[in-house]
Image (cartoon, rainbow, N blue to C red):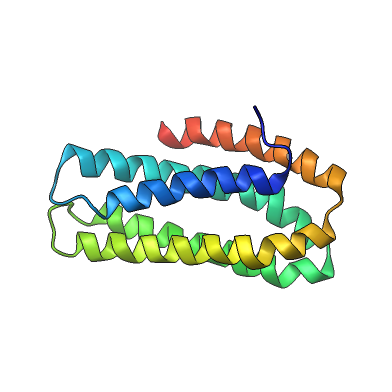
Amino acid sequence: MSPRNIFEALRESHERQRALYAQLIETSGDTPERHAIFDQLRTELAAHAMAEDRHFYVPLLAHDAGVDLSRHAISEHHQIDELVESLQETEASSPAWLPLAKKLAEKVEHHLKEEEHRFFQMAGKLLTDQQKTALARAYQDEYEAALVSTAA
């Protein structure tokens, strides 16, 4: 069943992200498990950010009250991307890898909480019910396509 509105669609991905980063920071060493979980998280974060930017934040930019929060959130997506790149460039066996993974987990959690507790409330006031439903469908389609292309 597809989500009824954009907030439900985004929360589904948020829960996947939380589960993956929780698993990731429990890994150790250069193991297939660490690589697999990191790849899943990397793919999830990239697909979510791409679809969310286009089908949540860009529509909010059309409203004066949505400009600052959208810019802030898109900036945080960029910071998360940079942390993912740093992890990709660091050997999984390196002592620096786990602290970097924990920093990524903290940044993602900060971003998710901020979205759920601040941005969703503002967006709820700015978007119509029809927009919330249409954006959920558009987000879901883009997210699923991005999952496939990002994983490849």
- 90 with respect to 54 (left or right): left
Q: Is residue 15 above or below residue 124?
A: above
- 100 with respect to 28 (left or right): right
Residue under the point 30% across and 63% down: 102
Return the x and y of residue 140 as percentages of the image width and height.
64, 36
- 108 with respect to 74 (left or right): left
- 72 with respect to 80 (left or right): right
Residue under the point 52% across and 42% down: 47
- Number of marks present in the image shown: 0
Q: Is residue 104 above or below residue 4?
A: below
Residue under the point 13% across and 63% down: 95
Furthest residue toward top: 1
Return the x and y of residue 1 as percentages of the image width and height.
64, 27
Return the x and y of residue 57 as percentages of the image width and height.
69, 56
Residue under the point 22% across and 60% down: 98
Residue 62 visible? The answer is: no
The quadrant of the image that shows the C terminus is: top left
Q: Is residue 60 above or below residue 31?
A: below
Q: Is residue 72 above or below residue 7?
A: below
Return the x and y of residue 64 as percentages of the image width and height.
83, 70
Residue 103 visible? The answer is: yes
Nearer-the-camera pick, 132 or 74: 132
Rendering quarter of residue 104: bottom left
Rendering quarter of residue 62: bottom right
